[in-house]
Amino acid sequence: MEVPRLDHALNSPTSPCEEVIKNLSLEAIQLCDRDVKGQKSEFQHQGQPQGNKSQDSGIAEMEELPVPRNIKISNITCDSFKISWEMDSKSKDRITHYFIDLNKKENKNSNKFKHKDVPTKLVAKAVPLPMTVRGHWFLSPRTEYTVAVQTASKQVDGDYVVSEWSEIIEFCTADYSKVHLTQLLEKAEVIAGRMLKFSVFYRNQHKEYFDYIREHHGNAMQPSVKDNSGSHGSPISGKLEGIFFSCSTEFNTGKPPQDSPYGRYRFEIAAEKLFNPNTNLYFGDFYCMYTAYHYVILVIAPVGSPGDEFCKQRLPQLNSQDNKFLTCREEDGMLVYHHAQDVILEVIYTDPVGLSLGTVAEITGHQLMSLSTANAKKDPSCKTCNISVGR
């Protein structure tokens, strides 16, 4: 792989791009620095391909190269995809490189990626198709992209002959897989801390919320779709239906804190009514919000329920009796519960919960809105809670 230079050829033994080419797997595209100050080429223009051959002197104009057509995108993951296309056989043997223009769909007029210094115009040596494009520095999970392709022929002087741009294709990257979530789980386990005993799950809301539940839902809280807070690649965001509960306790009292960001009315329910041998426990996410606090999202689903089936396909399952975050163990004929001390647990229960199973009362503390995680964005630079795939 290499990047076109307009001032000199890239065959110098000191060129960092040429060193990359020597070790390049044919299955992947990497990136090289392509900061060519004071120079221009069509390939470096910001924005979408215009379907025109270059008019700049830096790229030679000779016999036309075949234009890629019928572009196909396949094998999409959170930070990679395979691309293939068809093209005329004319001058096909002259193709030495592919130019790939990749842009986030929402930024069609600019390349505002997470790292501004990373180019989105990729260069790959001509390899057999389909070809894998992989890179967590420029591909993010669950993100819509546009892609277009040129074929190119590198000349002896370092310039390129290029084809016209192909049509523009749209696609969307995938969520984290179980493999990626397991990596996130392992990072969360490192900071979970020692376990503290607890006895109730609780949910804070405004008085109007509970009044609405009594009047319109037969006194039962209903699952709702999880918002987009947390890791951008988490497969539960915007998809899993459930009810949020907390279980964290104050270190000195062993009881739930009196402050809450979600409302001054609290529903409390005995832990065994939600978490017991008839439920499964799953890991859903690990993130922070530009603070020292880290959050872990767990999912409790009754065995065989729709929520349980959803999680089995997408999330790592935890041993309810032995994990670093939330445990349910039988001791002397009773269920005993513990939660991790050094992370803030948010628990999603996937079935309706009747208010008659617990109590609703007003708390005496403050409503700390600054601690709300509603649609909170994860800090992509945090080394504690990010993994080395698209964020």
Image (spheres, rainbow, N blue to C red):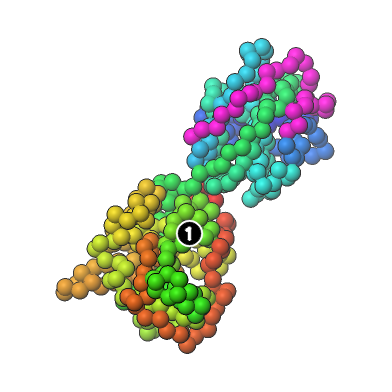
Task: Specify the principal SS of the magenta part.
Answer: loop
Any part of residue 51 in sight = yes
35 displayed left or right of 237? right
* Residue at 64% in and 15% down: 88
Amino acid type, residue under disc 1 in the picture: Val
Magenta stretch encompasses residue 142? no
Which span is picked out in magenta?
Answer: 49-75
65 displayed left or right of 256? right
- Image location (x, y in percent) of residue 297: 43, 62
In front: 102, or 142?
Answer: 142
Outermost residue toward the bottom in this view: 364
Q: Is residue 110 above or below residue 86?
A: below
Quarter of the figure with the N terminus = top right
- Image location (x, y in percent) of residue 135: 56, 40
Residue occupied by mark 1: 225
* Residue at 45% in and 85% down: 362
* Residue at 54% in and 51% down: 391
391 displayed left or right of 305? right
Any part of residue 341 in sight = no
- Image location (x, y in percent) of residue 356: 34, 77
Magenta stretch encompasses residue 73? yes
In front: 201, or 196?
Answer: 201
- The total of numbered circles placed on residues is 1
Outermost residue toward the top in this view: 90
336 displayed left or right of 78? left
Disc 1 element: strand
* Residue at 65% in and 43% down: 105
In front: 145, or 137?
Answer: 145
In front: 213, or 357?
Answer: 213
